[in-house]
Image (cartoon, rainbow, N blue to C red):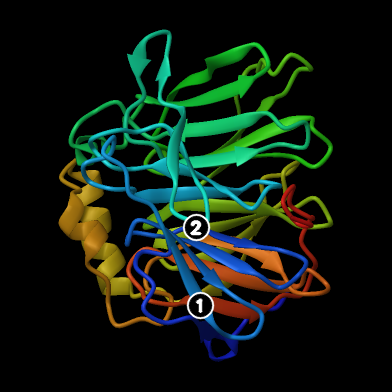
Amino acid sequence: MRPIPLSEVSLLGEGLVRPECVLATARGDLYTADWRGGVAHLKPDGTQALYAGATADLPEGLRPNGIALEPDGSFLIANLGSEAGGVWRLTRDGQVSPVLVEIAGVAIPPSNYVVRDGLGRLWLTVSTRLQPRSLDYRRDSETGFVVVMDEKGARIAADGLGFTNECQVTPDGRWLYVNETYGRRLSRFPLQADASLGSKEVVHEFGDGQFPDGLAFDAEGKIWIAGVISNQLSRIDPETGAAELVLHETDDAHVAWVEAAYRANALGRPHMDATPATKLKNLSSIAFGGPDLRTGYLGCLLGGSIGCVRLPVAGAKPVHWTY
């Protein structure tokens, strides 16, 4: 697969605030997490809307990191705010309500990502139990976990992970894939019918300056990884672990600065919040969309727009594709 030139990436939207997670639908709608307190909607006609929520239960307001689209048009929000983690529902008229905020009476920490699988089960990732979260930007990070909620209730499905980020169930329902950002691993777990997970398998270990964040499947069964800091989009073979670099905008000096801090266990917010004058603005996620599912929509941590680029293969249809 030929590397895609950065010149082929265009930018969509304006005034977005931390559009970390992007969702695309068959109708051409794009939705992004937005730190103005909800979800930004980029409509097929080129207009934008913001669905922002307000509730006394969240003094900070919503701090969406991951979002999921529901069949009724509402959104599930993985809330990264320090006041209340877990999953919250946001309707388009701004109503906010808790969906999953504790397990066995214990409050869920600030949360990273939420998604439903093909059977309607909810999966939530929590990157770390430490506060502030930057204390776990470490090579030995191991306090992250994955929650599953189904008709039997909510429970921790996997624990001891190295800063859990996006997770996805494969279209055939056989595996749960998870990015461990500061563990610098793409891992997977065999998924049983009762939503229990088998032993973890490490699919790929990332190198210097590579910190996996977002992930998506293509129609050929490969996994696409969006990497923060290095601004790299990679495609990984799940059976061999081989990785292809598809798109990148890597500033070597910036990556070296971050890598030195990471190796010294001194990585902190200043490293994550600083980025060179790049187009990708700290690439964080990828969503396949467009009529043929061959357009990549790229989320970021530090920009006011999302990236848009044509890809050489189609993506797998996400669960929300026809919503």
Q: Assign a secondary structure to mark 1.
A: strand
Horizontal side of 138 relative to 26 (left or right) equals left
Q: Nearer the viewer, residue 186 or 57?
A: 57
Q: Which quadrant of the rendered structure holds the C terminus?
A: bottom right
Q: Which quadrant of the rendered structure holds the N terminus?
A: bottom right
**Residue 114 pos. (x, y %):** 53, 40
Q: Which residue is mark 1?
A: 48
User: Which quadrant would residue 44 be assigned to in this image?
Assistant: bottom right
Horizontal side of 265 relative to 4 (left or right) equals left
N-terminal-most mark, 1 or 2: 2
Horizontal side of 261 relative to 41 (left or right) equals left
Q: Assign a secondary structure to mark 2.
A: loop
Q: Which residue is mark 2?
A: 21
Q: Which label was assigned to residue 155?
A: none
**Residue 74 pos. (x, y %):** 58, 49
Q: Residue at x 65, y 53 (%)?
A: 216
Q: Nearer the viewer, residue 91 or 21?
A: 91
**Residue 181 pos. (x, y %):** 42, 44
